[in-house]
Amino acid sequence: MSMTAVPAASFPATLLALWRGADFIQKTAIIIGLALVILAVMAPIIAPFDPNSQSLIARLRPPLGFERAKGGYVLGTDELGRDVLSRSLHGLRLTLMLAALGATLGLMLGGVLGLIAGIAGGRTEAVIMAAVDTQIAVPFTLVALFLLAIFGSSLQVIVLVLGLAGWEQYARIVRGEVRRLMKMPFIEAARAAGAGPLRIARYHLLPNIVSPLVVQFTLSLSNIVLLESTLSFLGLGVQPPTATLGAMVGIGRDYMPTAPWIVAAPALMILLITFAVQILGDWLRDGADVRLRAR
Amino acid sequence: MLSYVLRTLSRMVLTFFVIVTIVFFATRLSGNAVDFVIGEGITSEDRDLLIAYYELDEPIFTQYLAFLRAFTDGQFGLSFIERRPVVDMVLERIWPSTQLLLSAMALTLLVSIPLGIAAAIWRNSWVGSAAMVAAFLGYAVPNFVLAIGMVLVFSYWLNWLPVVGNGTALHFIMPTIAMAGVLIAALSRFTRNAMLDVLGQDFMRTARAKGLPEGRVIVKHGLRNAGITLLSVIGLQVAGLAAAGSVVIEAIFAWPGIGDLLVTSALRRDYPVLQFGVLTVALAVIVINAVIDLAYAWADPRLRQSMKG
């Protein structure tokens, strides 16, 4: 209990120190990341139009400043006369929400399995690690394609599929750390004092595994954004008319020769997300100084 | 060595068996197996006939055994849409996929190994930083964004390159680059790190002290040792990335490969094709990984020695 109190007291100071230690590119990434999150959270307030309201008279209008642009539609309109800016903002919101949910689910699933494998050992560990090896051996895009085709592309299924992406990384990391920590004297001391496996896991193991998990969470976040965008791009993700960034790029692709602005905004947003998240992940990894394999 | 080979092979078979089992039970879990195997749009008598024919009224374990039997007689079912054996449909797609994969791998190796070496040697100058920033950006750009960006510029604006199909050599340019992008980014980072590990070793100093020319030191003593580490990476990372990449890239460029087939069958809910296609690609990735595992063991003299006993 006292363990959580110590970092909490110095949290703002820690953040400030981290910010001072960042170089120019890292600071840029932090600002981009924060800006994207704020835009996503505020999307319903700042989006000028309903993302799904169509206006067939105002179809395929270019962004402001170009010929034929229509007042109010800052980034132009798509093939059904919907506002590209509003759709991009709502798409960003949904993409980030799905990615955060998926990454959290993967963290919990993989973390718990890794913890069980590391503490229990023996046959339990062998089975869990065999599952991890199998998952690593199969490209996840295939798994996702298959699952979405047979279970349908509802939001629940999509979140579950995104949660399955990357659980094996958490399981591997947690199990490795747990096995290392279990040999440490303080665990032996705790056990000698009569602590059960749950207590040891909660108070002695978890606080020591947090930093590699935070790093892995950040790295997997960008993978999940990419996965979700790819699936939506292919038409297997969130179904129309709901806007996600990948789906906007996928559908806008057909109108690219005459209306390239439809894909420009969402594609740029995907780029910015992956760029910012990857830089932050690398930076955190260097900061946490754990030996993790980059994916 | 023999026991290592056997262990690798048995693990390969086991992994594939697990995947086959999961695929079977996932499809049965998803709801009505009848719709899954037979498809929609037939009369109820035909439906009953087919249910009996496919033994779908049997208990699930009997069905599972019947499903496994397909691996002995090759009867994996018919496509809902094209009414052709799925085996034929998948097999005719293998060669185009392989072609694209090989050309993307060739481009990746040609670009990323020199780039990674350069980044390692001149790690403190602008050359190293520029190479790594380029690799980083390549990693952050999703392959479909890269692909449609190229289509926009080189096909629609400049009218230089064709977009659809694999008819001529020109058709290869954009899919190859789009697929290699992420691979180049990944492999040049790995090459750089592997080379950095090697460059500080004593045997490199010895090689220089012997008076060998610098190029020879780097290639013969540096790259050879770094190459062993790279092999293992190429297996796990690159095979996976390439399989995932081919799905997206083939779909964008309508390349007649397995990736394109998987996406269309998933979109059209053509389950028999999807199921067999997924199993084929999974098997391919597992086999490639096993081969690279063995090559890795064979290439590293230390491992080779330790396994002789």
Image (spheres, coloured by chain):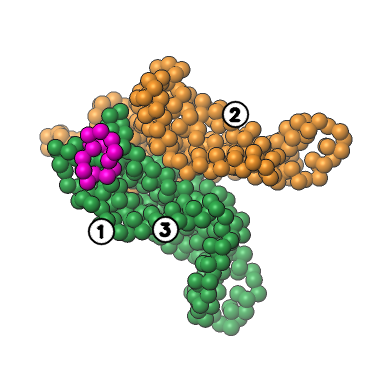
Chain colours: A green, B orange
- Asked which secondary structure carries label 2, the reply is helix
User: Quick one: A5 or B130, which is closer to the camera?
Assistant: B130
Reading the image, the residue beneath label 2 is B110
Q: Which residues are magenta?
A: A61-75
- Is A14 part of what is drawn in magenta? no
In the picture, the disc for residue A34 is 3
Name the quadrant containing residue B208: top right
Q: Amino acid at mark 3?
A: Leu
Reading the image, the residue beneath label 1 is A45
Specify the subunit that label 1 lies on: A
Mark 3 neighbour density, 10 Å: few (under 14) some (14–19) many (20 or more): few
How far separated are the C-alphas under marks 2 and 3? Answer: 38 Å
Identity of the residue drawn at 47% across and 28% down: B176
Q: Are the residues under marks 2 and 3 on the same chain?
A: no
Quadrant into which the C terminus of chain B falls:
top right
Residue A203 horizontal side relative to residue A290, left or right: left
Give the residue furthest to the bottom: A193
Give percent across and percent down for residue A165.
42, 51
How far separated are the C-alphas under marks 2 and 1? Answer: 50 Å
Specify the subunit that label 2 lies on: B
User: Quick one: B100 or B292, which is closer to the camera?
Assistant: B100
Quadrant into which the N terminus of chain B falls:
top right
- Is A65 part of what is drawn in magenta? yes
